[in-house]
Image: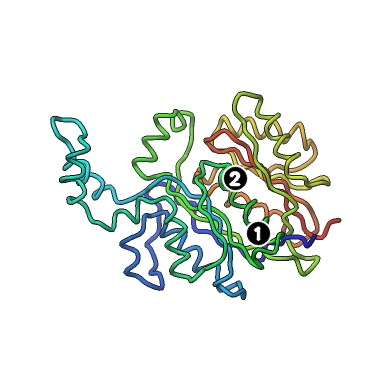
Amino acid sequence: MTPVAIVASAALGPYAAGASPVETPLATPRARKMMSRSAYLAARCLADLLPAISADRTAIAYYLGVGGSAGSLDDVTRLLDASIAGEVFSLPAFGDRGLAACNPLLAFQLMNNFTMCHGAILEGLGGPNGAIFSRGAGTIAALAEAVHAVRAGDASCAITGGADVATHPVTLAELARDGHLARGMVPADGAALIALGPSTSNDDVIVEGCAHASGRGRPIADAIDDALARSRASGTPNKVVLAPWGPPATDALVSFAATRFPNVRAIDTSARGETLAASAAFAVVAGIDALGGAPGRAVVITLGVDGDPGVVVLSRGVA
């Protein structure tokens, strides 16, 4: 079986609330009005990644972890205001007045899959694809789909990763409701993408395995061990990269790493902020950086707000 290698990567962010840079134009600037912030970040990141890839774009696979709808709050507010009857939301009023009160292009911002689709359309990607909703582990599932596409020969190149906007007011309300903000989560926006292809050199960074497991209703250490076993990777790492959503998850992952890999340096990426669907992809990029140019193996362990841990095992120049 041909090993699957990481042939390129790109990232935008993470950007904390109020820290997002001025947007740079896309190849088709008019398309921006149809995009949510998440879709823009994914499309801009994709445009940055593709020059490093020589594959036929019409055959490139694309699997992306995406977050919740992050459309224009001004448009959403107008829609909801016009849909109120008797101080409560009314479905008839929504159909009669609400839809007419907002820009029709809002639909393209609200459909979660268009976080992936906008960039794919602009760049002409035509291979197997899928947008997977993610609050952490879904992005590991997207990575697994991309790895499978290359291993199975469905695509000679597959792009994967995640894009999300945790600072959107609706998402912030969700995170506050579920207690994550009160427990120390720092929301951020960002996108990170990784391109995969068949390995051609011993210097390549190889994806040895990736998997996720349910962390609900059992000790998180057991769930991580389950994900490690499902990844089917072997060998001892010399680097461990941890991507917890906030302080409680940090405690759990640090404790696990200290027990499972007692003599291995652990790199905690949580200080950069939590980007939800993008966090696992940022962690994989951090794993690539941790390997550097020397032979070695890195285990990336993620734990998002969904409570389901993920594991990605990377290596370079090791048997």
* 160 lies left or right of 207: left
- Here the colouring is rainbow
Q: Which residue is mark 1?
A: 149
Q: At label 2, which amino acid type do we have?
A: Thr
Q: Residue at x 68, y 32 (%)?
A: 223
Q: Position of residue 130 (x, y in %)?
A: 53, 55
In the image as oriented, which residue stretches furthest toward the left? 86
Q: Quadrant of the C terminus?
A: bottom right
Q: Secondary structure at mark 1?
A: helix
Q: At label 1, which amino acid type do we have?
A: Ala
Quarter residue 199 falls in: bottom right
Q: Residue at x 66, y 25 (%)?
A: 219
Task: Give me the disc on residue 209.
Answer: none
Q: Secondary structure at mark 2?
A: loop
Front: mark 2 or 1? 1
Considering only vertical position in the picture, is 111 above or below 274?
Answer: below
Q: Which residue is mark 2?
A: 269
Q: Residue at x 40, y 59 (%)?
A: 21
Q: Quadrant of the N terminus?
A: bottom right
* 290 lies left or right of 94: right
Say few, some or many: other residues with alpha carbon within 10 Å of mark 2 (under 14 / 14 to 19 / 20 or more). Answer: some
